[in-house]
Image (spheres, grey):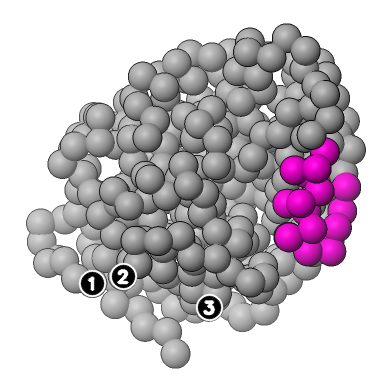
């Protein structure tokens, strides 16, 4: 597992290049839920997602350790690809990003805008094989989206920062889980700064491989990319490095598609922020946990809003139903 020293070193390394994102809260939401929710707003991060942290750290570590580096490559459904493309351009390295054809087109275009080549393939399996093949060439180095020590340490800087920005003890910390890089770094940062706080991961029910891995004690694999609004969590499995951290979590929650759309609408409305479904789904996990807790005393919770990149097609799906007619509450049920 990574250590807090790895996260601290990553934070110092990337600090000149990233945004120091705020922690915000909504008094109206807190009133409705009866609990105190704080949000680390990584949708305001470079490239619009926390992934900038891991990408920036990994590129710098590679430049320090690999003097012969001539290109970086990545496989991604979007945000990690943007992060690697941005970080590579920042440090003068060519980059190529391998993506499935069903990935968000706004994310694919952003990768091109950062100067990287986009290689689109029909399946996640084809993408993963192609990037592994590309990395066999001399001077070409692969930056995986989550199963990499430098990436995990970089992602952990989001919670490392957040816990310095809040001057009170927390009861719980929540973050989304795709491949597990963010939740792994979040776990280590939280255990260091607030050992009493519980740490939970949330993922889409349609792609619950990480939750099943957590419950079974063995890495579970999906046969194909899940169909979900949470395009930042469409990984086929967690990695060996992230799984070592995931096993130490205090719990895991899976979320259906309807509450995902519901919370995307409500967080955008209440916080006045452009929030991805992958981020917003975490609030359903929070409510699932709170339903098993007493209403008093009020629980203090930190949520990582991991990103804010949504294409038009996904936005249309999110707003097919007007969820703003139903006020948030902890015991809100779903069919």
Left/right placement of residue 206 relative to residue 77 reads left
Q: Are marks 1 and 2 in contact (CB under 8 Å)?
A: yes
Instruction: Name the residue tied to disc 3.
Output: 258
**Residue 231 numbered mark, or none:** none
Q: Label 1, label 2: how many angstroms apart (C-alpha)?
A: 5 Å
Q: Residue at coordinates 21% horizontally, 44% vertically from top-left?
A: 197
Disc on the earlier residue, 1 or 3: 3
Quadrant of the rendering where the N terminus is positioned: top left
Label 1: element kind: loop
Image spot of residue 131 (x, y percent) = 77, 44
Instruction: Name the residue tied to disc 1.
Output: 291
Disc on the earlier residue, 2 or 3: 3
Q: Nearer the viewer, residue 178 or 18?
A: 178
Left/right placement of residue 43 relative to residue 168 reads right
Q: Label 2, label 3: how many angstroms apart (C-alpha)?
A: 14 Å
Left/right placement of residue 93 relative to residue 172 reads right
Residue 179 visible, this angle: yes
Q: Return the residue found at the far bottom.
A: 335
Image spot of residue 195 (x, y percent) = 19, 37
Label 3: element kind: helix
Image spot of residue 51 (x, y percent) = 60, 38
Q: Are marks 1 and 3 in contact (CB under 8 Å)?
A: no
Q: Using the rendered view, name the quadrant where residue 232 is placed.
A: bottom right
Q: Using the rendered view, name the quadrant where residue 148 is placed.
A: top right
Instruction: Name the residue tied to disc 2.
Output: 288
Q: Are marks 2 and 3 in contact (CB under 8 Å)?
A: no
Q: Residues in magenta?
A: 119-134
Q: Residue at coordinates 34% horizontally, 61% vertically from top-left?
A: 217
**Label 3 crowd bin: few (<14), some (14–19), many (20+), radius 10 Å:** some
What secondary structure is the stretch in magenta mostly built from? helix
Q: Residue at coordinates 67% horizontally, 34% vertically from top-left?
A: 143
């Amino acid at each position: 597992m990574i250590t807090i020293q790895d996260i601290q070193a990553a934070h110092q390394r990337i600090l000149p290049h990233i945004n120091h994102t705020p922690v915000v809260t909504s008094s109206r939401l807190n009133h409705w839920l009866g609990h105190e929710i704080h949000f680390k707003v990584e949708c305001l991060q470079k490239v619009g997602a926390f992934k900038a942290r891991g990408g920036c750290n990994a590129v710098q570590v590679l430049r320090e350790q690999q003097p012969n580096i001539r290109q970086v490559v990545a496989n991604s459904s979007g945000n990690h690809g943007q992060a690697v493309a941005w970080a590579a351009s920042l440090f003068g390295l060519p980059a190529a990003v391998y993506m499935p054809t069903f990935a968000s087109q706004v994310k694919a275009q952003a990768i091109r805008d950062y100067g990287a080549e986009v290689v689109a393939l029909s399946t996640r399996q084809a993408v993963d094989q192609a990037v592994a093949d590309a990395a066999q060439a001399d001077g070409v180095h692969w930056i995986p989206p989550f199963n990499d020590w430098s990436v995990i340490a970089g992602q952990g800087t989001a919670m490392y920062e957040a816990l310095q920005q809040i001057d009170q003890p927390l009861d719980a910390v929540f973050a989304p889980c795709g491949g597990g890089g963010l939740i792994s770094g979040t776990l280590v940062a939280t255990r260091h700064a607030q050992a009493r706080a519980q740490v939970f991961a949330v993922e889409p029910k349609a792609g619950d491989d990480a939750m099943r891995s957590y419950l079974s004690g063995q890495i579970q694999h999906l046969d194909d990319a899940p169909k979900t609004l949470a395009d930042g969590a469409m990984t086929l499995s967690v990695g060996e490095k992230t799984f070592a951290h995931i096993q130490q979590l205090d719990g895991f929650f899976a979320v259906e598609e309807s509450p995902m759309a519901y919370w995307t609408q409500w967080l955008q409305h209440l916080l006045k922020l452009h929030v991805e479904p992958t981020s917003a789904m975490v609030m359903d996990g929070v409510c699932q946990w709170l339903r098993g807790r007493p209403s008093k005393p009020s629980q203090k919770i930190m949520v990582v809003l991991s990103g804010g990149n949504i294409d038009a097609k996904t936005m249309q799906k999110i707003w097919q139903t007007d969820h703003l007619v139903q006020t948030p509450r902890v015991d809100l049920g779903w069919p």
